[in-house]
Amino acid sequence: MKLQTQIPLQKQSENLIDYNSNIFLLGSCFVENIGEKLEYFKFQNLINPLGILFHPLAVESLISKAILKKEFTEKDIFFHNEQWHSFDAHSKLSSVSKVNLLNNLNKAIKATNQQLHKSTHIVITLGTAWIYKHIEKNNIVANCHKVPQKNFEKMLLSVEEITNSLNSIIALIKKVNHHTSIIFTLSPVRHLKDGFVENTQSKAHLITAIQSVLSTQEQSRSLFYFPSYEIMMDELRDYRFYNEDMIHPNATAINFIWERFQEVWISASAQKTMDDIKEIQKGMLHKPFNSNSERYQEFLQKLEAKKNLLKSKFSHIQF
């Protein structure tokens, strides 16, 4: 008896991710879940320099600013609830210090510029098509920072607007890095604060735009879609795969989708290294009954030898 529908996936044949790859991850909180897995297995990657970006216009804005090397100045930040914020960045960058915030914002722009040039893979996860426009500044914001709702106009991006934004993102990236693979995904996190029907409409606009772009781009051999949303909705269609909020995927779901991502995008040569790193990571968490015992000292020596062997093969790996 078959008790689960499975999303058919096909292994990529070119430009697979290995330990020489450099991965850039941008977008919603789900891209950070995948990024954390890559971090754990010591791949070279950068995750959301400006923090979580929920909608495509926010991603486009970051990439455009980075390529133009635009610096943030005092006119780009504001003070609210005893902290300095930027409407272009997530609250994790907010600071009680104006100087610290500007430094961190400009470091993020520089890091994004460098990463765009050297990335072999760029993963972009879109979360919502709902956006907020600051009425006074007449700007689309990436994050509202709990500024009162009356200061914003809430709008739903049309399929055409999202398509135009995605085409702009692709053109900007290809301008500085023609050989990178761009992998789009749709976040499985439901934005139910917008409403149940509104969330479905938002996801529909995003997926329609992504598929439109993939089907019309001449350089489509370097553009891809990974069905993280579909895996969550179909293969894992049970609330036991959600956190207590019944909105975000739990650890089991994240691990499952990560395993499916591995099937498609991680090279066979990298799998052995991943197994070695997992063994080291578990070893580092081991708590002995007697830390002074001869047996434990031997264990530590073997663990250190394994670390040094990996470092000799891949200089970027650090434990």
Image: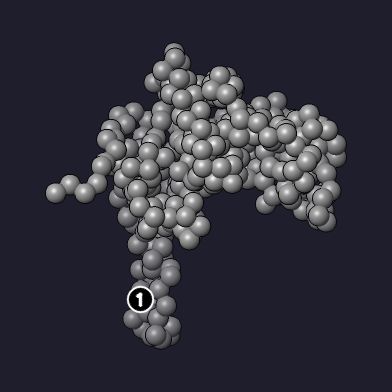
* Residue 11: % across, % down: 29, 34
The image quarter containing residue 224 is top left
Horizontal placement of 36 versus 169: left or right? left
| 270 shown above or below 310 | above
Residue occupying the point 29% across, 38% down: 7
| Camera-nearest residue between 224 and 21 | 224
User: What coloring was used for the rendering?
Assistant: one colour
Q: What kind of element bears circle 1? A: helix
For this orientation, the residue located farthest to the left is 1
Is residue 275 in view? Answer: yes
Seen from the viewer's position, the closer of residues 160 and 258 is 160
**Measured from the top left, where is residue 246 in percent x and y?**
47, 55
Name the residue: 67% across, 38% down: 142
User: Can residue 114 be seen here?
Assistant: no
Task: Residue 278: give x, y in percent of width and height.
Answer: 37, 59
Question: What residue is drawn where x is 51% and y is 38%?
Answer: 197
Coordinates of residue 178 in the picture (x, y in percent): 50, 21
Looking at the picture, which amino acid does disc 1 mark? Answer: Glu
* Mark 1 lies on residue: 298
- Other residues around mark 1 within 10 Å, as few (<14) / some (14–19) / many (≥20): few
Eyeballing the image, is 39 above or below 261?
Answer: below
- Depth check, front residue: 252 or 313: 252
Determine the residue positioned at 84% across, 48% down: 79
